[in-house]
Image (cartoon, rainbow, N blue to C red):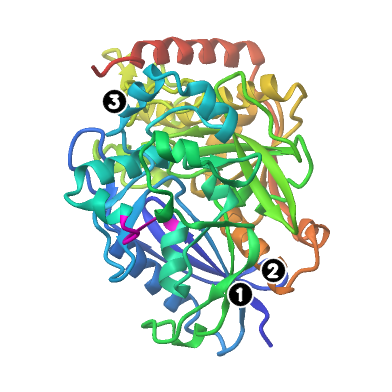
Amino acid sequence: MASYILALDQGTTSSRAIVFDRAGQIAAKAQYPFPQIYPQAGWVEHDPMTIWDTERLAAAEAIRELPEGSIAGIGVTNQRETTIVWDKATGQPVYNAIVWQCRRTAELCEELKRQGLEERIVSTTGLLIDAYFSGTKIRWILDNVPGARQRAERGELLFGTVETWLIWKLTGQHVTDYSNASRTMLFDIHRLCWDEELCRLLQIPACMLPRPVENSAVYGTVQPGIPGLETLAGVPVCAGDQQAALFGQACFHPGEAKNTYGTGCFTLMNVGAEPVRSRAGLVSSVAWSVGGRTTYALEGSVFNGGSTIQWLRDELRLVDSAPECDRLAESVESSGGVVVVPAFTGMGAPYWDMYARGAILGITRGTGRAHIARAVLECIAYQVTDLMLAMRQDAGCDITALRADGGASVSDILMQMQADLLRIPVDRPAMVETTAFGAASLAGLACGLWRDTEELAALRRSQRVFLPQRPQADCDDEYRLWKKAVSRACHWAE
């Protein structure tokens, strides 16, 4: 009997596959990292074929020990705004994937603002004009890859964010779910369709865009003959989502919020059946659409969260691992006035500064690597605090708890810092793979493994709840220093 769901979790630095059973527990998983490509300062790319190969290998490894026929369905979650354009006939990408962190289209975004398009884009898509989103990345490929625009206009090229690319490779279907479509700067989140006028304004042929679909539905079935995935032939692919962690954290009611501490940090709050227009630098997105009912979210995105720890390890070589960063940070009582602003690729919400750059401020002769390690963890918590304060302002209601997940959420010291700064409980689940579980949940609903959201909510368990401990006055003083440091890092690049 098919009693498992396979979740493909294609992230910014690795491709993962996780198998969940009916109880929501992990039955098997596999992970393959892949290289980052930095052609110029501020540019970030991936090889789309490497994305596919590593995800395929991860899926093959994860299902290797399972009986044939035991996978009921497949869900996909992914690095969202990352943009891939490929040849419809050959399946070959025309250029590397342009990663969500990439800032190469900053000047184009400024031109769109000068044309007075900001209000049009915000009111339609819920997004601000920024190089973060997919629309200007598509335009860059069409403008800079020889022959690409002509081929796209002839209907020979397809665009997709990463989940579209993976679903196309698996099933041959060219689709995108509403939640990913709402991150392109081309999608009307009210009518749930592509906006033809925005496509014309950005000079993007609508024929290359995928068909928008609900987040929990059968999109197609796995094609036979995929190396390593032969036993999955005929299995339905029935979920796509990036806001999946909100679903996986069982934030099914308006006012419930979560933060994913991944490469970036992504704070989302369920705002119900109508989108909320942000006045505090957040964006509005489709959270999910299931059974004809659409739920919206307010979201703030931090471009560099856990990647700041990777930078400390790989570039500065001050630590050998993330646990060592925690141990160093715990060895000092404070950062000694040191503040790290990780604006390696600009600042996301609520600042939206494409020209900010990273900084370490407050260094003295007594500063050691332990102080910098602590400041790195603090800067992650500060950025999430920025988002949560903006969210409270926009939502007009208090947020009584924050549900945490993602790789960096395993850090006790970081979670405690977060609870101290926000003055609310931070709830870490027993199973922190909630982004993958969210995609699995949506797939499981579509193929009948779970009945409804009430059954899914009952599967969630808290592993630990962190309560505020430090005096609020001390936390407020340190947060003010963070805001001062951010002001120094903003508008740095010219």
Point out which mark residue 107 bears. Answer: 3
Which of pointers 2 and 1 lies earlier in the amino acid sequence? 1
Q: Would you name the residue on which mark 2 appears?
A: 446
- Nearer to me, 19 or 430: 19
Determine the secondary structure under disc 3: helix
Residue 233 in the image: state x and y as whole percent.
50, 85
Which of pointers 1 and 3 lies earlier in the amino acid sequence? 1
Q: How many labels does the image show?
A: 3
Residue found at x 65% / y 26% = 277
Residue found at x 44% / y 36% = 305
Q: Alpha-carbon distance for marks 1 and 3?
A: 42 Å
Can you tell which quarter of the image residue 356 is in? top left
Can you tell which quarter of the image residue 452 is in? bottom right
Tags 2 and 3 touching, CB below 8 Å: no
* Crowd around label 2: few <14 · some 14–19 · many ≥20 (10 Å): many
Given the image, on which type of amino acid does mark 2 rest? Ala
Can you tell which quarter of the image residue 158 is in? bottom left
Task: Say whether residue 66 is left or right of residue 146.
Answer: right
The nearer-to-camera label among 2 and 3 is 3
Give the magenta-colored segment's residue range. 154-162
Point out which mark residue 73 bears. Answer: 1
Determine the secondary structure under disc 1: strand
Q: Alpha-carbon distance for marks 2 and 3?
A: 42 Å
Q: Give the vertical position of 20 relative to 35 (above or below).
A: below
